[in-house]
Amino acid sequence: MYQHNFFLSFLLRFTCLTCFGIGSTTVFGQRDSLVMKNGDILVGEIKNMTKGVLTLETVYSDKDFAVEWVNVREAYARSRFLLLLSDGRRITGRFFTDNENNRMVIMDQDGAADYVSLDDLVYIKALKSNFWGRSSANIDVGFNLAKANNLKQYTANVKLGYLADAWQIDMAYSQLYAIQDSIDANRRTDASINGRYFLERDWFLAGSISFLSNTEQALKLRSSGAVGGGKFLNRSNKAYWAVGAGLSFNHETFFNSTPTRKSIELYAGTELNLFDIGDLNFYLKPAVYYSLTEAGRWRMDLKSDLKYDLPKDFYIKTNLTLNYDNRPAELGNTTDYVWAVTFGWEL
């Protein structure tokens, strides 16, 4: 009797595995699965999970599924992923849900297991992702036209990013041009390249190159290179908060007779990104610079975005950029700021 039951059990398992194998051959991409809190089951290929949203590719839809991670009850992944945990650990491996103990099991490349909750997973990236799968892009524009003084103003912002297993790089460019009768044209150009190399326990090394020109402060060009480091104080599926500090090296030229300046500064700043407020996203990044070579001089840069997501990857955004210098150029103002409302699209 025991042998008979064993044979039936073996036959049933063999039949299921055979059917699954045939299905997997026919539907190659269907190898990962999700069980939602409402009981729905999604089968496909997990591509990534970032900012609390998981992307799942299936063969029965011409578009990828975007699933909020907080609505996932169970997850089973057979591929190898780069996984980031809320405590700062970065693990390469696969993961699956252990229902008996109500936890997530992560198996690394050496077969060692880590046991975490679903909420501890804050980032997932398939290691076989191609260049475009690791890239991001935003572009938005705004235009104002007023009869008074024949005002014409436009703003444009472009952001590009790439995230590798252990590092990331972001490039940003923004421009403002405003002209009206009887007043000199107002121009502002801001460009930067920022890189981070991730270390253990949410520490990172940072480096950047930036360029700023604005007529409000009579600043023809400020070229800056910065090196430093920092730490993520909090990272979850809803937000992240980081702090950092380092040294900045400046070379400044001006539109007027102010002599060229070269200086070394100590900087400290913070970065806050809230990306799960419904369809809203809020970003804030202030930084303070204290000169080590010009006694008594200090500066502050601030960037803030509030973005509302629209269908088809479009969005509306309002952003504030502010630059303060307690010792600006001759005839230059201490403060320059731009507040704009723009319409854009993101990749």
Image (spheres, helix red, strand yellow):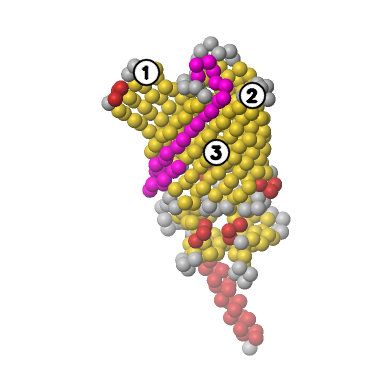
**SS of the residue under disc 1:** strand
Q: Amino acid at mark 2?
A: Gly
Residue for badge 2: 296
**Which residue appears at 49% of the width and 61% of the height?**
71
Q: CA distance from mark 1 to mark 2?
A: 33 Å
Q: CA distance from mark 1 to mark 3?
A: 32 Å
Most foreground residue, 9 or 266: 266
Q: Earlier in the sequence, mark 1 or mark 3?
A: 1
**Which residue appears at 65% of the width and 43% of the height?**
231
Q: Earlier in the sequence, mark 1 or mark 2?
A: 1
**SS of the residue under disc 2:** loop
Frontmost of labels 3 and 2 is 2
Residue for badge 1: 183
- Mark 2, other Cα within 10 Å: few <14 / some 14–19 / many ≥20: few
Residue for badge 3: 285
Residue 57 visible (yes or no): no
Which image quadrant for residue 114?
bottom right
What is the span of residues highlighted in magenta in the rendered image? 306-332
Most foreground residue, 319 or 157: 319
Most foreground residue, 192 or 27: 192
Frontmost of labels 1 and 3 is 1
| Residue closest to the far bottom | 1
Q: Amino acid at mark 1?
A: Ile
- Mark 3, other Cα within 10 Å: few <14 / some 14–19 / many ≥20: some
